[in-house]
Amino acid sequence: MIKVAPSILSADFANMGRDVKRLAGWGADVVHFDVMDGSFVPAITFGAAMCRAVRPYTELPLDVHLMVEHPETQIEAFQEAGANYLTIHVEADRHAHRTLQKIRAAGMKAGIALNPATPVCMVEAALEVCDLVLVMSVNPGAGGQKFIYGVLEKIERLAQLASVHGYTYEIEVDGGINAETAALAVQAGATMLVSGSSLFKAKDPAVLVGQMHALDKVKEK
Ligand code: DX5
Ligand code: ZN
């Protein structure tokens, strides 16, 4: 099953509870939560306090994408705030394997993210402790950017490694996802689609979510 993860980076920050509440009605599977610290990426968004604040507004899992330095310092705060997935960037953590283990020990699903310039071999030795691998298809830091087609090969490689080694991690693609790029990503092996601007700007977001879910069947053919 393909999971659709709307990114609340494109929501109305002044009405975050209201916007998070709407996502289940769109048919979304998880809520993608972009944390930026002004250091790993220039922008600053929100942190664990926002996660705690929106938690009562949805029963969907919260999929936290940490674009922060020293992500290991955030584990406890996000666990207490009700996060379900916690994803760190391999470029931000010299001890990614240990941090992933700590995330799992805290009861959350552990994810590792790769920037567009980072090859799959940088995370290969940590895949055994990953529940999710997030392939950035834009450079992190902002919504509304164009999809980088070169990352499709990395998604294929991650799918191949999963089948060779029997890994069960989800493969999430993040950035520039619309109906067309979603199809390419799923064809390559992506199982979770993050979409910010395309979904939030859609006339009927539920229709676009439905189209993304249906890509599963296209792949089976
Ligand atoms: C970018 C974020 C993405 C972003 C996606 O740094 O990680 O989650 O919100 O937004 P769109 O879909 O607009 O590219
Ligand atoms: Zn993200």
Image: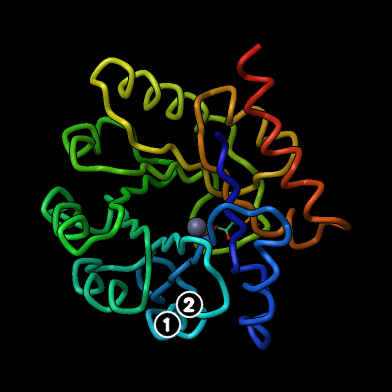
Q: Do the residues under discs 1 and 2 have CB atoms within 8 angstroms?
A: yes
Residue 169 image offset from top left, x and y in percent: 34, 36
Asked if 62 appears above or below 159 in the picture, the reply is: below
Q: Along the line of sight, which residue is nearer the eye, 213 or 154?
A: 213
Residue 143 image offset from top left, x and y in percent: 62, 61
Q: Give the labeled residue for mark 1.
A: 52
Which amino acid type corresponds to the residue marked 2 in the rendered image?
A: Arg
- Farthest front residue in view: 59
Instruction: Give neighbour class at mark 1: few <14, some 14-19, many 20+ (Cα, 10 Å).
Output: some
The residue at the point 25 percent across, 66 percent down is 71
At mark 1, the secondary structure is helix
Rendered image: mark on residue 55: 2
Judge left or right: residue 126 versus residue 212: left
Instruction: Give neighbour class at mark 2: few <14, some 14-19, many 20+ (Cα, 10 Å).
Output: some
Residue 176 image offset from top left, x and y in percent: 64, 47
The residue at the point 35 percent across, 44 percent down is 132
Q: Quadrant of ligand 1?
A: bottom right
The quadrant where residue 211 appears: top right
At mark 2, the secondary structure is helix
Asked if 185 appears above or below 208 in the picture, the reply is: above
The quadrant where residue 84 appears: bottom left
The residue at the point 57 percent across, 37 percent down is 2
Judge left or right: residue 30 versus residue 90: right
Quadrant in the picture for the N terminus: top right
The residue at the point 23 percent across, 70 percent down is 75
Which amino acid type corresponds to the residue marked 1 in the rendered image?
A: Arg
Residue 145 image offset from top left, x and y in percent: 65, 53
